[in-house]
Amino acid sequence: MANQKKGTAMAAVSGFFKAIGGFFSSFGTAVAKGDLFVKLSLLWWGAGYVRRKQYIKALIMTALEAAVILFTIFFAMEYVPKFGSLGTVKAEKVFNPQTMKSEFNDYDHSFMILLFSLFSFVVWFAAFIVWIRNTINVYKLQLMEEQGEHINTFKEDLKTYIGEKFHITLLTLPVLGVIVFTLIPILLLIFVAFTNYDQQHTPPTELFTWVGFKNFIALFGGGGLTSTFGYSFIRVLAWTLVWALFSTFTTYIGGILLSLMLNSAKTRAPKFWRTLFVVTIAVPQFVSLLLVRNFFADSGIVNTICSNIGLTGFLRDAGLISTSYIPFLSAPGWAHVMIIIINIWIGVPYQMLIATGVLMNIPADQLESAKVDGAKPFQIFVKITMPYMLFITGPALVTDFVKNINNFNVIYLLTQDVYTTTNQALANSQAKEVDLLVTWLFRLTQDYYNYKMASVIGIVVFVICAVFTLVAFNFMIQGDKEGTYQ
């Protein structure tokens, strides 16, 4: 079964590349075997439709071609020629003798050049695909005409896109949204990673330019003024992975155990306790985190209580702290542990709800059979409950791990304006011991305008999440797990 699924995955990848190859092969066939009007369609997109009396289609394709040409002349050509340098003229005020005023010169804006050049590339690529598809379509019309088949009118084509091809109509707008609001920002992030866009090179007063892989070298331990970035990256990456691992599995296991206790026949008033935990989910997370941050602050209520009962003095005498308070959220080690503990308190109720729903669906005959065979509760948990839970909630577990890698709220709200690093190497890179890659990225952009290094970190986060997701899901689909639980 595992080999069969691997074969299916390989077949899907192979089919994808075959489809691309077939697309370009069909275009080559259309150009080689098409008639004069098919070949003319390479220059005038509507020519083939005019020959087959599809005048409305011809008008639409001609208008689309004209729009691409006008876009290229009046918009793209203003930015794309400067893409290689990202601009050469800085913004300056120049005295205009005609108006007798100081006015800004005709300066270059590096970010606008980068953004609109990228947008132009996307438009051109889309136009290129439409151009190829249009040539293939008019060649198909030629073949239909030669074979005496009926060629749809424009009205019949509209009915087709409302009927059997409605999925294309339905997906057109979402696909455009993904391109504009997801694809272009991701590509822009990647491009910025190869520039020197930072606080010293902020348009329009300053220009930024291409620097190749210099930023990646700096992040992974390169020399120069940014040598500390390599040190900071290793520290922050290690804590990010440790945090993601502990925050995911502590809440996951805690939610299952809590659900088992609430579902136990020995638990009194289970509905009351379950309702109590559900209510905690209704409180907005940022409110809970800010309250907890104040509770555990250096001068917070928890430190006051610990000082009054003598716990603070005991820890200081034992050499565990050197301050007059317990640095729950303001010292390395203490802060790391407290963040994980607080996250358990926040995350367990939610996981408890999920686990409750899954546990209710475990086949009762399996549990009864195990008890009859003399299995202990722990054995039932290890051999039946947990495997079943992992099978059902495995994809959600992977999603939670990736979400925790990017868990901005917990780290930022608990440590912002509370934790200050004393590590000079980290401070030079605008990082802290408690930072995740995503909070480090946020601080680099919002506080220090270091967009180049933030973009590199963003790419690294994406690669880590993508690789983990692919490996985890590939592991989950191995074996006949579905057949086992059916």
Image (spheres, grey):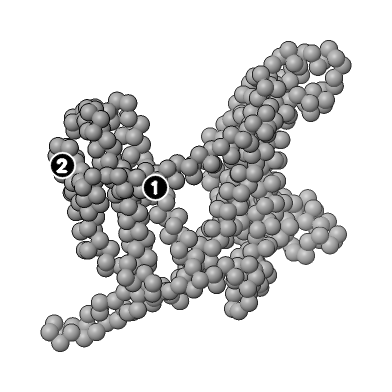
Task: Identify the residue position indicated by label 2 in the image.
Answer: 50
At which x and y percent is residue 163? 29, 25
The one nearer the camera, 209 or 58, is 58
Q: Residue shown at 85%/14% (left/top)?
A: 373
**Earlier-in-chain disc, 1 versus 2:** 1
Q: Which of 352/268 is in front?
A: 352
Can you see residue 180?
yes
| Left or right placement of residue 308 versus residue 281 in this view | right
Is there any visible trace of residue 396 in the rendered image? no
Does 165 sit left or right of 281 as displayed? Answer: left
Amino acid type shown at disc 1: Phe
Work out which quarter of the rendered image holds the C terminus and state it.
top right
Q: Quadrant of the N terminus?
A: top right
Query: In the rendered image, which residue does mark 1 sit on?
Result: 24
Residue 225, placed above or below residue 453 = below
Identity, as a three-letter code, of the amino acid under mark 2: Val
What secondary structure is marked by label 2? Answer: helix
| Disc 1 packing (10 Å; few <14; some 14–19; many ≥20) | some
Residue 264 x, y percent position in the rendering: 73, 20
- Give the residue at x 18% y 31%: 153
